[in-house]
Amino acid sequence: MNQIAKKLNEMIEEKNEYIYDMLSDLGRSIFYPKGILSQSAEAKSKATSRFNATLGIATEEDTPMHFDHIQEKLQDYAPEDIYPYAPPQGKESLRKAWKEKMLRENPSLEGKEFGRPIATNALTHGLSIAGDLFVNPGDHIIVPDKFWGNYNLTFNVRRGGNFSKFTLFDENGKFNVEAFRETVMEQKTSGKAIVILNFPNNPTGYTPHEEEVEGIVSVLKEAADSGINLVVLLDDAYFGLFYEDSVKESIFGRLISLHPRLLPVKIDGATKENYVWGLRVGFITFGVEHKAVQDALEQKTKGLIRGTISSGSHLSQTVILKSLESDDFEREKKEKYALMESRARKVKEVLAQEKYQQSWKVYPFNSGYFMCLELINTDAEKLRVHLLEKYGVGTIAVNDTDLRIAFSSVEERDIEEIFELIHKGVQDLSNR
């Protein structure tokens, strides 16, 4: 094992042996090398450096070399904020701005110590980093029975983890705390589990209420008390889009310092929150209090980034930073929120019609981009294809019974029509 990796492992183990035990084989082996990037950063930071002949970019009169026909399309941004490589951990000013945003929007973070957000190539990359750091083949990944299908590629196919599923909703349409507890406590034999909590949930669009969150936190503490090491991944892709009386912040803050055997990891996507999907900017934040452990996990994360994508898009990070700093940011975000909330309320109004009750049941939803129908006596995949071919309606078949509808991409004026067409599709298949 590389000596730098050994040193990072020692830093972690000295402050929290449980977090060291949580690391995968790759997580223990990975490190950030003292190579070109670190030497270049050192050269750049030295005010006495007369010439900087380190990093592999080209310059012209102390400015990053570039084409004028590109720069003229990007005149609002300085060449220094576009063309050079961004650091593997992201622009420091962006990391600072995102942490400030987290503190504003999550009151439970007040007074808590945690790592600085590390920029990723959007949210999936953050999940992948977490998988590389913590998942060994055979490790248990605890997810609800309604979960985003890409988890399968990230944690099962890539890392060899095994899914342990619990039923998301109880008989009252609430988060099934008891089923969650049973599944988590089943991991006592192995002594380790990776828990994924995704709110607002994809595909159902559900975020739990305060009482349910208290139950979730209680279960995790009970499990940690029983000797289970828990890596809790908070997939906060649709953060902020809370339309009703659910909790209005991430569970991340409540889990920091809850127990030495519990490591919360917050994974964000500026892509979803700020409607810039193609810019591919996200963040991974480690909820650990010890500065030495924060630093060691950051170095390991930088090593994973350096060894895969090297670094994220500098231009995309600059755009996100300037957006966060804009005087128009809060106003425009409220406007888009109101639009999404209005669509969600329209969906509920339409689905309340009695005529639909023989075609489907509606899973609880109160947030996010999506909602989900539980079809009655209709195969979801057959319906999906039929809707597409006969009515030109695109939906997602989650499994045999569940159909996901992204109201985020349907104008409010069209919501009644789309559900009427889905209802017609169910009737078509029933009459065959």
Image (tube, rainbow, N blue to C red):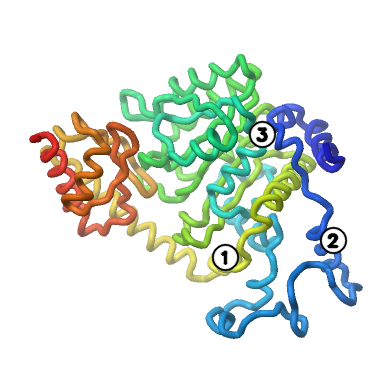
Total number of numbered discs in the rendering: 3
> Of helix, strand and loop, which one carries label 3?
loop
Q: CA distance from mark 2 to mark 1?
A: 25 Å
Q: For this view, does 298 lie left or right of residue 42?
A: left
Where in the figure is residue 340, as x and y percent of width and height?
A: 34, 55
Q: Are marks 3 and 1 in contact (CB under 8 Å)?
A: no
Residue 93 visible? The answer is yes
Q: Residue 39: which disc?
A: 2
When asked about the image quadrant of residue 252, the answer is: top right
Name the quadrant of the C terminus.
Answer: top left
Q: Earlier in the sequence, mark 3 or mark 2?
A: 2
Q: Residues within 10 Å of mark 2 (few under 14, many from 20)?
A: few
- Residue displayed at 71% across by 60% down: 87
In this view, 77 is above or below 334: below
Q: Is residue 425 above or below residue 185?
A: below
Could you give the CA–CA distance between mark 3 and mark 1, rounded to whole angstroms? 33 Å
Residue type, label 1: Ser
Which residue matches tag 3?
A: 257
**Residue 326: x percent and y percent?**
54, 70
Q: Position of residue 402 (x, y in %)?
A: 29, 35
**Would residue 350 be seen by someone viewing this image from the given angle?**
no
Q: Which residue is mark 1?
A: 316
Q: Position of residue 355 (x, y in %)?
A: 11, 38
